[in-house]
Amino acid sequence: MNKTVCSTSFSYSDSSPVFPDKDIIYICPFSGAVKGKVLITNFRLYFKSSDADVTVTLDVPLGAISRVEKMGGASSRGENSYGLDITCKDMRNLRFALKQEGHSRRDIFEVLFRYAFPLSHGLPLFAYLSQEKYAETGWTIYKPVEEFRRQGLPNNKWRISFINKSYDLCDTYPTVLAVPYKSKEEDLRKVAAFRSRGRIPVLSWIHRENQAVIARCSQPLVGMSGKRNKDDERYLELIREANDTTKLTIYDARPNVNAVANKATGGGYEGDEYQNAELIFLDIQNIHVMRESQKKLKDIVYPNVEESHWLSSLESTHWLEHVKLVLSGAIQVADKVSSGNSVVVHCSDGWDRTAQLTSLAMLMLDSHYRTLRGFQVLIEKEWISFGHKFASVSGKQHCETPRSPPRLFGCYFPTAFEFNEHLLLTILDHLYSCRFGTFLYNCESVRDQHEVRSKTVSLWSLVNSKVDMYLNPFYTPESGRVLYPVASMRHLELWVAYYIRWNPRIRQQQSPVEQRYKELLALRDEYLKKLEQLQLSDSSTSSHLANSPTPNTTSSSTSPPSQQYTHLQTPL
Amino acid sequence: MNKTVCSTSFSYSDSSPVFPDKDIIYICPFSGAVKGKVLITNFRLYFKSSDADVTVTLDVPLGAISRVEKMGGASSRGENSYGLDITCKDMRNLRFALKQEGHSRRDIFEVLFRYAFPLSHGLPLFAYLSQEKYAETGWTIYKPVEEFRRQGLPNNKWRISFINKSYDLCDTYPTVLAVPYKSKEEDLRKVAAFRSRGRIPVLSWIHRENQAVIARCSQPLVGMSGKRNKDDERYLELIREANDTTKLTIYDARPNVNAVANKATGGGYEGDEYQNAELIFLDIQNIHVMRESQKKLKDIVYPNVEESHWLSSLESTHWLEHVKLVLSGAIQVADKVSSGNSVVVHCSDGWDRTAQLTSLAMLMLDSHYRTLRGFQVLIEKEWISFGHKFASVSGKQHCETPRSPPRLFGCYFPTAFEFNEHLLLTILDHLYSCRFGTFLYNCESVRDQHEVRSKTVSLWSLVNSKVDMYLNPFYTPESGRVLYPVASMRHLELWVAYYIRWNPRIRQQQSPVEQRYKELLALRDEYLKKLEQLQLSDSSTSSHLANSPTPNTTSSSTSPPSQQYTHLQTPL
């Protein structure tokens, strides 16, 4: 039995049918050929088996489709050889067979092709058609000035600049930037001229106590001739001076050789002319290498999990190595900052590997980002507002970023995160579902132009309207704690709940421990309620309850064990 | 910092010093050369560093030592090159350096050699000298007749035989055997003549509802000429008939080729002459191959964990493959039995691979064995009473059985076991510590001869006297449930808490989730106590408490969530 259901409940009547219920055969890699009916709306492909003995359901958002191909010619032989082959961005391949007579696949192919790639066909993205209504609006979750204020900015070293309010300093940057107090607006323009795509170094996070910062940017435009730029050098010096860091550490996410090769196309890296700066390469491969690795990963997990040489097959994809390098890079960043040294992080354009490193380092450093809403802020800030290639021209979404690190964190530190794995899966699914506006387009300027915020719904509207689905019952806030995961191969494992989720042989169940814990929390609350009732009904016994903790009291982490649960999140 | 402490608290004043505090250098693989003092008692080697800046403690039961070698000659050069190299059965190697002058290592070498291998030197095993006293005696935990009664035996198909009461049917079998009701005592003797070491097929477990059994034995003595034995054939037929199994399934743990090769030394396997029987080879390698694999495993985890090709290195040890084959063999046994078919399990002598298969299958089938005391019964029954080569002549203990499966179970089914990982580690440590009599000698007859039960202490005396150390807080009894773990490489992982425990870089901490859960249980109990106090102090409010569950009520698993915790084990 292979039951595949979309991870979020969304009635398909919310989208409009564009292709009627039609008889089709789904070539299921687990159950074999299964007869059923297919329905396509402007949002999704829905298949339901009609055989009595096997139940197969498919529910695929069209945005998750990366390719639709015809399989077998009109003259092809063999059963079920004529049909469609659909490649998905969620590690699946779907094959459908149709009757050969009368070009029966033509209609479905055309409909799929149109609606899976709407922008190429002059159609609006589904997010603009969706009529979903939620109690909360997710568009207000991230307000840059408020987030800077939370971090303690502006202060006497850092100021908020609106120089980019019309996106004319940098068209892929947000409008609100935090820059050294001493830098002048004309300095910023001069620096922009020397940084790839104008992505100048700006503050992304500041350490409350030691004032060390994480700044992010793109590579300097050094080129073959080894150009220097005094303004850029002076500007980095301003960043260093802001908290008297002896040496500013520049983390270049790339492998050294790639950074050198980038000089040929006008890029490069900071040389010795940058005084008081130290450059460290983090050896993280670029998106093309990642994509290659992910393709290999798909081959060993879908449809069947390679069993006989699983460990060496997994090793040969190099996937966990990439994950490890990203993780250990982020650990270095977090460690440097928490010991009082400011850092600058960049790669080539500074919107993929850079965002990975800065956001992971911030997850380690700042417990606010480990809350449900703080995590949304982090994604809005480091990925959405600072620009990331979520979309390519055709309306396809792509994103080959290693997705495992936040989930690995959850394994290492099961009580440190307010949200659960289901939130991560939901985010990844909606990276390309096209149902929400959140991950549409690559940067703020284009989003403004397409009025994303006023015309589409935010993914966070969905999430924050049913918070209890995404909460980790084990969560215990520890605000001062820096998390240092171990970046060793022995500790890394493949994220099975994501990468192998389509395989019906892989069990996916709520952890019984989690279930148990939730029940126990409920029981505690029930007892507490009874105690309160007793207290009300008989005030003479109230002395017994004087020390009894109540669920909503916040208590410090040094409180005795019996009080430690009072700050636990109870599912709402 | 490398702190290595014995897993159970045992004051070393309980054993007698045989070698005084002496200055020595421990060549620690993690901290380098560490100066300190060594003390040897008749039970253990104890080392404590004297340097102020590094704390290293070693506490090694002498029974855990498998080899002591001199390192470097009297004329050897280089710092710390003259000393001792100690190989342990717990994956460690210990190197000590001494001063070259005056043959300073001679005394310590001789003392270690004598007391680590006492039987070769006419000395008693330490278990006979230990004066430990416990509130409980572990020797009564397993009573064969009682255990058979628990299973519902004897009944009209199976009888209890005392034919082996003087160990003259089979000197490695226990005295109490369960055999088909219809078999006569003289039949048993004839069958014994045709089974290696007289280890005839006997019932080890019976399914309460469907009456299918797990019988265990050794290989038939078929030999090169392909001998038949009508008595043996008829006897297996009696086992089959006992619950009307259509076909009796014989699981031969060995690889097919090995079973064939065994014919050359008089052994073999059941051929077509066994009607109504089906033979299945489970492809589990013998002890020599296992040992080779474990040696390779040691190379990649001690002292340092191979990082750059961890996954392929782990694969090349084949360790997880062995674990997988044992696990999938046991699953087949459990599945066959739970669907109503009786099985016979054997390997060559039927005391290593056979015990692995039968005990794992029983853990899956019978929830009683998943309790703290039931697990002790299982070990006493399948390993100790049915004979297993725990000891070799020199007083060395050895046991290369894959130890991971029960722990894997615990990962798959975190609420199914009453005991925790600490129990498994304790058992493994005392397999060769020589502190308890439990794992001394290979079979009951030799244990009787050496008066183990009257002259030594049982490991279960220790365990059952401080039960709370070994309880799993998440345990929820589900008596009818059969556990089927997934025997796939993707689900297997190395048991780090055992195999990599000496590495100080590998964190070993109590799971914060477990900690949290225990605290929450304590909180629940506290509230409950308050509720009870209130009830006592004011009987008018008792109506509020009418439905309140109390910790010691047993409730069915179908009770509403608020009642589900009443049967949870609270640490005592």
Image (cartoon, coloured by chain):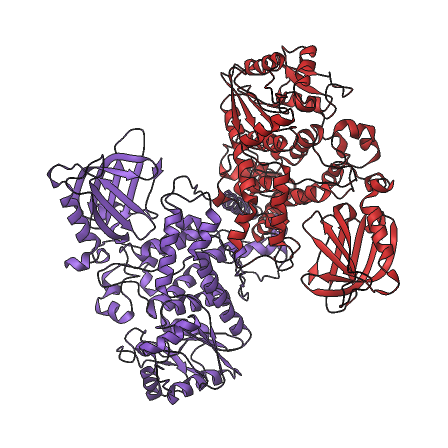
Chain colours: A purple, B red
Q: Nearer the viewer, residue A6 or A531?
A: A6
> Which quadrant holds the C terminus of chain B?
top right
Q: Can you say whether B526 is above or below B225 in the image?
A: below
Please state the horizontal and vertical placement of residue A362, each as a whole percent of the image.
46, 67
Residue under the image location 51 percent in, 52 percent down: B312
Identify the residue at horizontal 86%, vertical 42% (top origin).
B121
Q: Report the residue at 44% width, 61% height from top.
A: A322
Q: Give the percent coordinates (x, y) of residue B141.
A: 72, 31
Front-most of B546 and A78? A78
Q: Answer with left or right where residue A402 lies relative to residue A171.
A: right
The residue shown at (78%, 39%) is B436
Q: Whole-percent x and y of residue A129? A: 20, 55
Decide: is A395 above or below A540: below
Q: Quadrant of the N terminus of chain B?
A: bottom right
Relative horizontal placement of residue A507, taking residue B405 as reference (left or right): left
Q: Position of residue A544 (x, y in %)?
A: 63, 50
Placement of A315 over or under A274, stated as above or below: above
Q: Residue furthest left?
A: A102
